[in-house]
Amino acid sequence: MFYIVNKIEEDLDFGCEERPEGAPVMAVVTLADEEKKELVLRHEDALLYERNINENDRVYIDEDGTLQKVIVD
């Protein structure tokens, strides 16, 4: 299934604590499927940069549960 990235925000919800030392910076990613149903995921921010995933990109969730950008030639 393919999704459109609607929004990417920094994950600032650490409860009463700060982000644990050594923990990766996370992002909250809001996706929409073809029927406009939303799905919200937490994803490592560095992975989004590494895969050049931005708002309005078309993506899918791979077998490892991580986002992959759909490349159109």
Image (cartoon, rainbow, N blue to C red):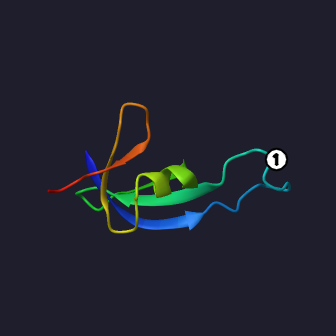
Percent x, y of residue 61: 36, 42
Q: Nearer the viewer, residue 16 or 26?
A: 26
The kind of secondary structure element at disc 1 is loop
Farthest left residue in view: 73
Q: Is residue 65 above or below residue 29?
A: above
The residue shown at (33%, 68%) is 56
The residue shown at (76%, 55%) is 14
Per the image, the residue denoted by label 1 is: 21
The residue shown at (78%, 53%) is 19
Q: Is residue 63 above or below residue 20?
A: above
- The residue carrying pointer 1 sits among few (fewer than 14), some (14 to 19) or many (20 or more) residues within 10 Å by Cα, namely few
Which image quarter: residue 15?
bottom right
Q: Quadrant of the C terminus?
A: bottom left
Q: Quadrant of the N terminus?
A: top left
Q: Nearer the viewer, residue 23 or 38?
A: 23
Percent x, y of residue 31: 39, 58
Mark 1 is on which residue type? Glu
The residue shown at (43%, 32%) is 64
Farthest top residue in view: 63
Percent x, y of residue 48: 47, 55
Percent x, y of residue 71: 23, 53
Q: How many marks?
A: 1
